Amino acid sequence: MTNPFQTDGTWLRCALHAHTTRSDGELQPEALVDHYERAGWDALAVTDHWTITHPPARDGMVLVPGIELTCRTTAGVWVDVLVYGLDRELDVEPESYDSYPDLPDAMEFVAAHGGVAYIAHPYWTGVPMDVVVGLPAVVGIEVYNAGCQIECGRGLSSVHWDGLLDAGHSCFAVACDDTHYAGFDSGYAWTMAHVAEPTADGVVAALRSGACYASTGPRFDTIEPAPGGLLVRCSPCRSVTLCTGPEDGGRAMVGRLAFRHRARIVDRDPSTGLITAVAFAPPPGAAAARIELADADGGTAWSNPVAL
Ligand SMILES: [Zn+2]
């Protein structure tokens, strides 16, 4: 379990789920890169269905090789998988569901060819999470998918995530736009990757080790050990939540009654009174925690689990 806030490196704002005309997206690959570059993002993984799109390289924008696979599961439902750093494509007929691989076989291939995998939009797909446990290459899930949220309100998969964590599995998270119509469904969700070098390999390594966090607005400044617990510093937020497992955890919030549990507000934004630092005293026996931030504009950020 890595804590990226305690190592040297640079944070990159990454778009990790986006489509171009090479699959079912509206923009040409170069135009999609233009779009995200103009909006100030640092890295883009084009994740076309079944094909690895390589837009022309350019300065100032890290382009991460990506692909979205669809696989069969024993549960009888399809699962989409985001893969980064894969060095070749699978031999699949894109228009034929019958030719799609079984999930374990596809993940064997991904692991053998340098890829790291995140299960896409589990809530939207309706996939039971036990089918992804123990698979090679799979390190996490897409905890938030903006496109699924915009279309039908099934973008948030934090319950799926906690189900895996509660059962003792390692699981990281990314948040993504799943852009098909840039401008309409882009700029809502991103993943901050903590990299030693601002390169595609650096981003893939961060995703592999969980040196990243997901966001639709708030920013983590630090998550670090403190006497008796954990200190979290962040952009101004209405609530900061310590998620440690069933039936307990911790939370600081502002607003009506300003309830607090196992938390002490250490710092506030002077003009708004919103929280910028919280010290948590985690429940006895808790081994790890993920942190969730909620800002005043409806944005959320999700850290990966850190050891307590
Ligand atoms: Zn997609």
Image: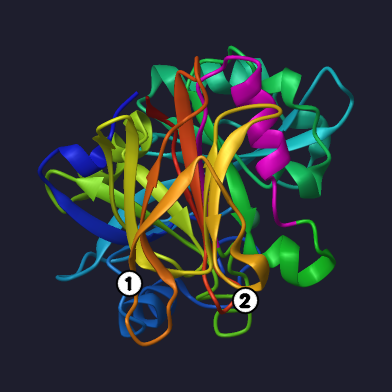
Q: Quadrant of ligand 1?
A: bottom right
Q: Amino acid at mark 1?
A: Trp
Find out if the beta carbon at label 1 lies less than 8 Å from the nearest ligand 1 atom.
Answer: no
Q: Residue at x 68, y 66 (%)?
A: 147
* Circle 1 crowding by C-alpha within 10 Å: few under 14, some 14–19, many from 20: some
Q: Residue furthest right?
A: 76
The answer to whether 35 is drawn above or below residue 292 in the figure is below
Q: Position of residue 190 (x, y in %)?
A: 46, 62
The N terminus lies in quadrant = top left
Q: Which mark is residue 215?
A: none
* Circle 2 crowding by C-alpha within 10 Å: few under 14, some 14–19, many from 20: some
The answer to whether 18 is drawn above or below residue 157 in the figure is below
Q: Which element is circle 2 on?
A: loop
Q: Residue at x 32, y 29 (%)?
A: 228
In terms of image quadrants, where is residue 274?
bottom left
The C terminus lies in quadrant = top left
Q: Amino acid at mark 2?
A: Asp
Say which of 122 and 262 sits in front: 262
Q: Position of residue 62 (x, y in %)?
A: 24, 60
Q: Which element is circle 1 on?
A: loop
Q: Which residue is mark 1?
A: 41
Q: Residue at x 86, y 21 (%)?
A: 75
Q: Image check: 198 left or right of 35?
A: left
Q: Which residue is mark 2?
A: 185
Say which of 124 and 97 sits in front: 124
The answer to whether 121 is drawn above or below residue 44 in the figure is above
Count the marks: 2
Q: Position of residue 217 (x, y in %)?
A: 47, 70
Say which of 40 and 72 sits in front: 40
Q: Which residues are magenta?
A: 155-176
Tell me, yes or no, if residue 269 can be seen here. Answer: yes
